[in-house]
Image (cartoon, rainbow, N blue to C red):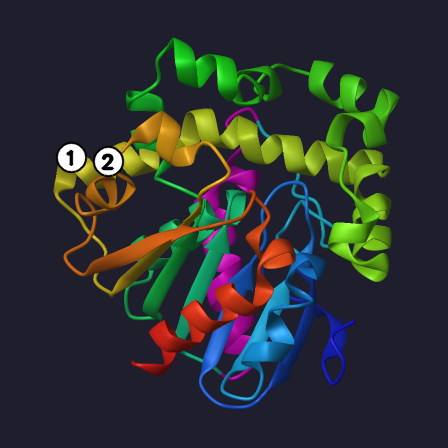
């Protein structure tokens, strides 16, 4: 897994991140979603490494990265805090400006990084996501039924107790789809109480402080300053719930393109060749 890549723990001002990086060329940062670790990229990253320097961290709170201290407003798990990690990580590796990809929960950190640090992000790719504030503003009974976990995870203590009672039954990933080493890494994450808590804190921040950050940007008329690629899974429910995905993102960016991929939610594991081709074409055109 990740042949030719270096694995290390990098100490940053606010967090210690487990990071896999390799390849050569312009820098490209890949952010995973819930409940994955950076290992979800193990089929995609090597395909990009001939053209890019590819960096794959565990987000703070996830995997084997450090866990933020709990606070009433969940600010340590906010996407703004994780965005600072992204900028500091790439700066540590020698990059002031980089391409950025975020999937699922990682897409919210990617979006916040590009909003808060426009000089650092040259191009942005969002996979299976719309801004948190848009999702909540559009929330109806269909959304609440399908994505009920957002609201359950916002509760104190109960989500962690439910998940840790039987993590495999809760998350239900397949070894054959993920690959042996990535599946083992995933298993270690979902059976670790500190990591499960860190992942759930990401959702608690989402319904509070992250939403407020999005809404403040919208009220101030701030938009993304970089080109945006949006890809979503045709076999998942993002488009069914929200309709015109590109139309939603055009409210946040002037230069928007994208399409659906014929796969389930974890596209990096299911269609790595197609995903890598889309990312290479977008980021190589910078």
Q: Let me know if residue 77 is in the magenta part.
A: yes
Picture disc at residue 24? none
- Mark 2 nearby-residue class (10 Å; few <14, some 14–19, many ≥20): few
Q: Is residue 157 visible?
A: no
The stretch in magenta equals 72-94
- In the displayed structure, would residue 169 be above or below residue 79? above
Horizontal and vertical percent position of residue 5:
72, 81
Q: Nearer the viewer, residue 70 or 245?
A: 245
- Residue visible at 53% across and 59% down? 85
Q: Mark 1 sits on what residue?
A: 219
- Residue visible at 20% across and 42% down? 247
Q: How many marks?
A: 2
CA separation in Å, label 1 and label 2 = 5 Å
Q: Quadrant of residue 211?
A: top left
Prevailing secondary structure class for the magenta stretch in the rendered image: helix
- Residue visible at 55% across and 24% down? 72
Horizontal and vertical percent position of residue 2:
74, 75
- Mark 1 nearby-residue class (10 Å; few <14, some 14–19, many ≥20): few
Q: Quadrant of the N terminus?
A: bottom right
Q: Quadrant of the C terminus?
A: bottom left
Q: Nearer the viewer, residue 163 or 271?
A: 271
Horizontal and vertical percent position of residue 59:
61, 53
- In the displayed structure, would residue 121 be above or below residue 232? below
Horizontal and vertical percent position of residue 189:
80, 45
Judging from the image, what secondary structure is the residue with disc 2 in?
helix
Mark 1 and mark 2 in contact? Answer it, CB < 8 Å.
yes
Q: Residue furthest front?
A: 262
Q: Let me know if residue 110 is in the magenta part.
A: no
Q: Is residue 237 visible?
A: yes
Q: Mark 2 sits on what residue?
A: 216
- Residue visible at 49% across and 87% down? 51
């Amino acid at each position: 897994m990740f042949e030719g890549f270096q694995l290390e723990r990098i100490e940053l001002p606010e967090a210690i991140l487990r990071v896999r990086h390799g390849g050569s060329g312009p820098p490209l940062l890949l952010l995973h979603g819930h409940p994955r670790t950076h290992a979800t990229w193990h089929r995609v990253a090597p395909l990009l490494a001939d053209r890019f320097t590819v960096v794959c961290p565990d987000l703070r709170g996830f995997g084997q990265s450090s866990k933020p201290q709990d606070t009433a407003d969940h600010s340590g798990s906010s996407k703004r805090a994780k965005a600072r990690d992204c900028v500091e990580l790439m700066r540590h590796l020698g990059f002031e400006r980089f391409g950025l990809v975020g999937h699922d929960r990682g897409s919210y950190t990617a979006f916040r990084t590009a909003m808060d640090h426009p000089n650092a992000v040259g191009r942005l790719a969002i996979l299976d996501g719309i801004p948190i504030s848009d999702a909540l503003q559009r929330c109806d009974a269909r959304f609440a039924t399908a994505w009920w976990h957002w609201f359950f995870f916002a509760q104190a203590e109960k989500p962690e107790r439910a998940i840790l009672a039987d993590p495999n039954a809760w998350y239900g990933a397949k070894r054959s789809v993920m690959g042996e080493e990535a599946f083992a890494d995933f298993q270690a994450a979902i059976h670790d109480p500190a990591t499960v808590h860190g992942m759930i804190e990401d959702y608690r921040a989402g319904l509070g402080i992250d939403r407020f950050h999005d809404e403040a940007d919208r009220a101030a008329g701030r938009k993304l300053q970089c080109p945006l690629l949006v890809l979503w899974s045709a076999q998942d429910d993002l488009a069914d719930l929200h309709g015109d995905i590109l139309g939603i993102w055009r409210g946040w960016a002037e230069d928007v393109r994208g399409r659906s991929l014929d796969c389930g939610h974890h596209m990096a594991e299911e269609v790595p060749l197609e995903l890598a081709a889309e990312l290479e074409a977008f980021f190589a055109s910078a």
